[in-house]
Image: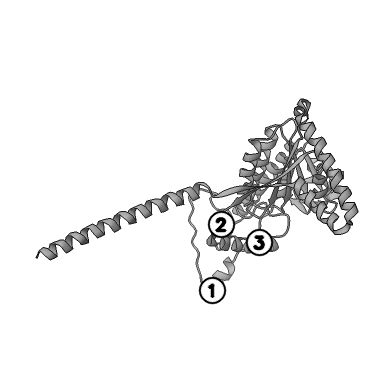
Amino acid sequence: MEYLADFILFLAKTVTLIGGVAILVALVTAIGQKAKKMHKGHLEITRLNEHYEHLQNDLKHALFDKEQLKKEAKEEKEKAKLEKKAKKNKEADEAIKPRVFVLDFHGDIKASAVKSLREEITAVLSLADKERDEVVVRLESGGGMVHSYGLAASQLKRIRDKGIKLTVTVDKVAASGGYMMACVANHIVAAPFAVLGSIGVMAQLPNVHRLLKKHDVDIELHTAGEYKRTLTMLGENTEKGRKKFIQDMEDTHELFKDFVKAEREVVEIDQVSTGEIWYGQKALSLNLIDEISTSDEYIYQKVDEADLVQIEYVMKKGVADKLGLAAESALDNTLMKWWGRFNTSRFFS
């Protein structure tokens, strides 16, 4: 009996100990997960001056002989000494190099990259000097949903509102919602064959009502509000709903036109808001852009006069996130092919 009592006491202590450890582990795990949620990403900084210098040095070592390399090394050493003396000079404080912050935006239909863009802009605005610094956004987008690209454009507008020079460079395409973003910039640079414009709105959806009716399938749609649903994929569409849908698109187009005109006063808005696209050189003549150049050329020409800093906010992604992004990308590509290029600002009412 005494043995049984001792065993029960030992068992109770063991259970209590295991329970305490389990609770402690659960608390630590919960804290760790909360910390992860609070820190979902981080900034990656690349000093482009150093990057370009490494490229140049690699090429020199491949092409120059020993004598040439020795001469180059001596010149670099002398240059470094002069720069060191200049830094010690009090007057050097008045000649601090301007900084060029380089951001990238690759847009899909939902402008998903705005999640990183907003963090990058917040970081830049915490340090940028409006008197000497510049933000360059390398933009690539064929457009997408109105509200998504409206938010992306508003993020870029934060830079302009702080009085900091904003330059957008376009190497391939900035159309529809992409151009909505680009027009916010003080200066727009595009490659000769980059696609610009598409200041228009479109929507397209299939309707299988007749097919369902043929097979005796009924679809019921109940709404509260006269225009809660104007067009539908499955039900029978009415002329009244169709007219309302078109009117909504026209209203959205007017908002788009007003936004472009307000941000870029040099354009003749009625001339460029037809939904057409133009390549770089023609876009320049229509004042849709300010300069013909690639992003590489525009940035590299500042390598001697400014500190070039590329900033990227990298989101932490688990396996599920990566699979989800792959599925979204596949869906985006399908939708872009189905609904057409460059005119995907609006899909459904």
The residue at 49%/53% (across/down) is 223
Quarter of image, res 5: bottom left
**Viewer-proximal residue, 295 or 34?**
34
Q: Amino acid at mark 3?
A: Leu
Lateral position of residue 296 relative to residue 43, left or right = right
Q: Is residue 279 above or below residue 304?
A: below
Q: Is residue 180 above or below residue 108?
A: above
**Who comes first in sequence, dot 2 or dot 3?**
2
- Disc number lying in front (2 or 1): 2
Quadrant of the frame with the N terminus: bottom left
Colour setup of the view? one colour
- Residue 173 in sight: yes
Query: How far across and how far down the image is residue 33, in percent?
Result: 45, 52
For the residue carrying disc 2, how many other residues have a C-alpha within 10 Å: few (<14), some (14-19), or many (20+)? few
**Alpha carbon distance from label 2 to label 3:** 24 Å
Distance Cα–Cα, label 2 vs label 1: 45 Å
Q: Which label was assigned to residue 335?
A: 3
Could you say which disc has been placed on residue 317 in the image? 2
Q: Nearer the viewer, residue 3 or 322?
A: 3
Q: Amino acid at mark 2?
A: Lys
Marks 1 and 3, how far apart in space? Answer: 28 Å
* Image label count: 3
Residue placed furthest toward the bottom? 215
Secondary structure under tag 2 reads loop
**Residue that appears at 21% across and 62% down:** 11
Q: Nearer the viewer, mark 1 or mark 3?
A: 3
Q: Work out whether mark 2 precedes mark 1 in sequence or the reverse, and give the earlier one.
A: 1
Q: Position of residue 171 (x, y in %)?
A: 79, 52
Is residue 286 something that shows in the picture?
Answer: no
The structure residue drawn at horizontal position 48% and vertical position 61%, both measured from the top left corner, is: 220
Q: According to the image, label 1 marks what residue?
A: 215
Amino acid of disc 1: His
